[in-house]
Image (cartoon, helix red, strand yellow):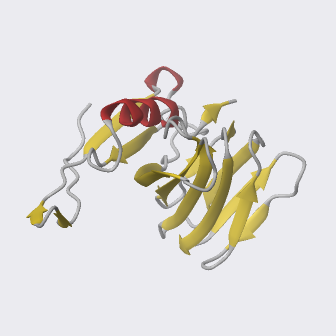
């Protein structure tokens, strides 16, 4: 299974412009008939070990319903927090195609999600499902069970900016449940 190359905008580094190629990791859970989750990772944002860890763990977010499109997760950056020893802050864009869905999962650290585009429905275990529109956000404590998140529209895409605070290794952002 192949996917088109993803190119990120030019970035000035050490006085030179260069195009940052991205690695597109894709895992298909074809045996179960689930859709594919795609993870785009820019190699100059995080090191090779971290990219491997993120791609491996985030690939577990395959679609939870046969035939529904899966999300695309693009880590943007990962930085150690100098004032919080042992912790890092990771930013990632999560794109939900029309009717897109993420199944039950959890995260090793705290997560704040901010809706940039579209309308999403989301539910944490023990709480009612909620609808989030542009400008709204939600918080997930470490280890909380995120039952699902889905694009409320069957015709328009949606997108969130997810902020993760977790251990310093810039490792897995998602833990399968």
Q: Is residue 2 above or below residue 19?
A: above
Furthest residue toward top:
31
* Of the pair 73 and 107, the residue shown nearer to us: 107
> In the rendering, at what x and y percent does residue 59 appear?
47, 34
Q: Is residue 40 visible?
A: yes
Task: Please provide percent x and percent y for residue 12.
Answer: 18, 67
Which quadrant is home to the C terminus? top right
Q: 93 left or right of 118?
A: left
Image point (24%, 48%), residue name = 22
Residue 69, x across and y down, in percent: 48, 48
- Residue 103, image quadrant: top right
Relative horizontal placement of residue 175, taking residue 91 as reference (left or right): right
Q: Residue furthest right?
A: 126
Q: Residue at x 72, y 64 (%)?
A: 138
The correct choice, above or below, for 77 with respect to 12 in the image is: above
Which residue does the image show at 56% across and 59% down from the upper left? 162
Choose between 9 and 147: the one closer to the eye: 9
Q: How many marks?
A: 0
Does residue 144 appear to the left or right of 159 in the view shown? right
Q: Is residue 152 visible?
A: no
Q: Give the residue drawn at x 59%, y 70%.
A: 115
71 w.r.t. 161: above or below: above
Location of the N terminus by quadrant is top left
């Amino acid at each position: 299974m192949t996917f088109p190359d993803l190119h990120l905008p030019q970035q000035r580094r050490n006085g030179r412009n260069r195009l940052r190629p991205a690695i597109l990791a894709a895992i298909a859970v074809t045996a179960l008939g689930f859709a594919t989750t795609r993870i785009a990772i820019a190699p100059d944002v995080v090191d090779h070990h971290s990219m491997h860890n993120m791609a491996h763990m985030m690939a577990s977010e395959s679609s939870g319903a046969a035939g529904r499109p899966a999300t695309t997760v693009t880590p943007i950056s990962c930085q150690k927090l100098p004032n919080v020893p042992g912790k890092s802050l990771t930013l990632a864009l999560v794109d939900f195609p029309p009717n897109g869905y993420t199944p039950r999962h959890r995260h090793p650290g705290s997560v704040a999600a901010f809706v940039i585009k579209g309308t999403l429905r989301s539910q944490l275990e023990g709480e009612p499902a909620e609808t989030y529109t542009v400008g709204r956000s939600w918080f997930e404590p470490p280890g909380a069970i995120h039952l699902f998140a889905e694009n409320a529209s069957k015709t328009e895409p949606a997108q969130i900016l997810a902020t993760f605070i977790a251990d310093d290794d810039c490792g897995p952002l998602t833990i399968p449940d």
